[in-house]
Amino acid sequence: MSDRRAEVAENLTQVRARISAAAFQAGRSAQDVSLIVVTKHFPASDIEILASLGVRDVGENRHQEAQAKAGATDGLDVRWHFVGNLQSNKAAAVAGYAHVIESLDRAKLVHGLARGASEANKTLDCLLQVNLDEPEVDAGGRGGARPTDIVPLAEQVMAAEGLRLRGVMAVAPRGQRPLAAFEKLVEVAAKVRRVDPTATWISAGMSGDLEEAISAGATHVRIGSAVLGQRPQIK
Ligand SMILES: *Cc1c(COP(=O)(O)O)cnc(C)c1O
């Protein structure tokens, strides 16, 4: 086994144990929590290692990098989650290789995503990204729709051909207790389920706060550094 493979395998074992322990604590089944490994800044060779270790879902936050890696690992049985800020002029292109868009946060993206999905002849899973900052705080480009804008956005996604509304996603804001933030997200998720009862996914929790997310009810956690180590800097 290569050193890198051994390191990733060890980290993955630890993260899976953390997920199991958090699920147990919350009285939930670990099988109800899906792991997405966020591979941004790491090479395509790491995705091959992850796939060989049973990881089926990977996440990326930048279009160019994601597109290149999806191309380089074509043939691997992994699903690509786009988790980053999405520009509307890139939406159709991202829909070409992504299986899940987790960062759908404005109506302007719906048309491009639907067009890309239709061109690729597929149905694209969509999560609405919720901005959990206090109303007076500027999101500072972190993205996400305000909770009050989520239901109208959900209705637009539901009406779009080729898009399947799956649920919600959020990043815990700095300066808030993650558990309180994730509980807010769970309330927004319930509102979305009143519009579409099948939209049951709640993507929350990263390396530092996956326990709080699972305790609040996350169905998907997005883990980068705890599996792959500290991200290499990219210029
Ligand atoms: C990078 C990233 C993650 C993973 O973060 P870690 O702290 O490395 O686990 C999760 N979600 C999003 C949206 C990200 O950009």
Image (cartoon, helix red, strand yellow):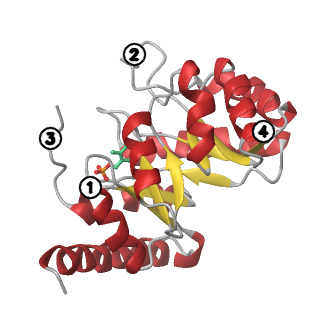
Q: CA distance from mark 3 to mark 4?
A: 35 Å
Q: Nearer the viewer, residue 137 or 70?
A: 70
Q: Quadrant of the rendered structure where residue 165 is?
A: top right
At mark 1, the secondary structure is loop
* Residue at 70% across, 46% down: 124
* Disc nearer the start of the sequence (2/1): 1
Q: Amino acid at mark 4?
A: Ser
Q: Amino acid at mark 1?
A: Pro
Q: Nearer the viewer, residue 21 or 5?
A: 5
At mark 2, the secondary structure is loop
Which residue is disc 4 drawn over? 118
Which residue is disc 2 drawn over? 137
Q: Quadrant of the N terminus?
A: bottom left
Which residue is disc 3 drawn over? 233
* Disc nearer the start of the sequence (3/1): 1
Q: Position of residue 118 (x, y in %)?
A: 78, 38
Q: CA distance from mark 2 to mark 1?
A: 35 Å
Q: CA distance from mark 3 to mark 1?
A: 12 Å
Q: Amino acid at mark 3?
A: Gln
Q: Give the left or right position of residue 20, taking residue 32 as reference.
A: left
Q: Crowdedness of circle 4 by 10 Å Cα count: few (<14), some, many (20+)?
A: some
